[in-house]
Image (spheres, helix red, strand yellow):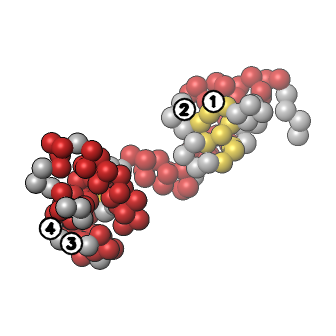
Amino acid sequence: MARTASSIAKVPADAAEFPTDFVVTSGNSLFCKLCSTVVCNERRSSVLNHRNSTKHTRAKDAENEPRPTLLPAEKVITSFLSADIPLYKLNNPQVKSLFQFMGYNAPLESCCRSRVASMAEKNMADPELAQGEEHIYGHR
């Protein structure tokens, strides 16, 4: 069925009615931001059916759930290395569950490893930071 001028005109109205759910694409289609799908917008009932679908409802619920946040990686790196805990211990299930218990996601070991060198350079460049913590980054 060809799209008529009236159906094209109501696309922005549907998007305006549900601004957190939909956006109008350059082709004047209705795109659901939560589900990452194009919604058939020929009829208003299609838009409402999509909003009531299981996929959309789950995406909406997931968006409203409080997400665990990340501790700053620098804080984790400094804490682990000053306590002589190797960074690969971040992969331990017990350590991951501890982070989740505290309401955080455990940072990835690879992300922490990639920051160690830059933190060491910053530490060595600033004499005030370097006092007393030079051993953390393996430089004396």
Secondary structure state at the residue bearing disc 1: helix
The residue identified by callout 4 is 83
Residue 118's x, y, as percent?
35, 52
| Residue occupying image coordinates x 33% and y 58% | 116
Secondary structure state at the residue bearing disc 4: loop
Q: Which picture quadrant has residue 17?
A: top right
Residues at marks 2 and 1, CA–CA distance in whole angstroms: 6 Å
Looking at the rendered structure, which numbered label has been put on residue 22? none
Secondary structure state at the residue bearing disc 2: loop
The residue identified by callout 3 is 85
Q: Amino acid at mark 4?
A: Ala
Q: Nearer the viewer, mark 4 or mark 2?
A: 4
Q: Nearer the viewer, mark 2 or mark 3?
A: 3
Q: Dots 4 and 3: beta carbons under 8 Å?
A: yes
Q: Amino acid at mark 2?
A: Phe
Residue 86 vs 116, above or below: the answer is below
Q: Amino acid at mark 3?
A: Ile
Residue 15's x, y, as percent?
61, 30
The residue identified by callout 1 is 14
Q: Which picture quadrant has residue 10?
A: top right
92 or 65: which is nearer to us?
Answer: 92
Residues at marks 1 and 3, CA–CA distance in whole angstroms: 54 Å
Q: Is residue 76 left or right of residue 64?
A: left
Secondary structure state at the residue bearing disc 3: loop
Residue density around tag 2, few if under 14, some if 14–19, many if 20 or more, within 10 Å: some
Residues at marks 4 and 3, CA–CA distance in whole angstroms: 5 Å
Q: Mark 1 or 4 closer to N-term?
A: 1
Residue density around tag 4, few if under 14, some if 14–19, many if 20 or more, within 10 Å: few
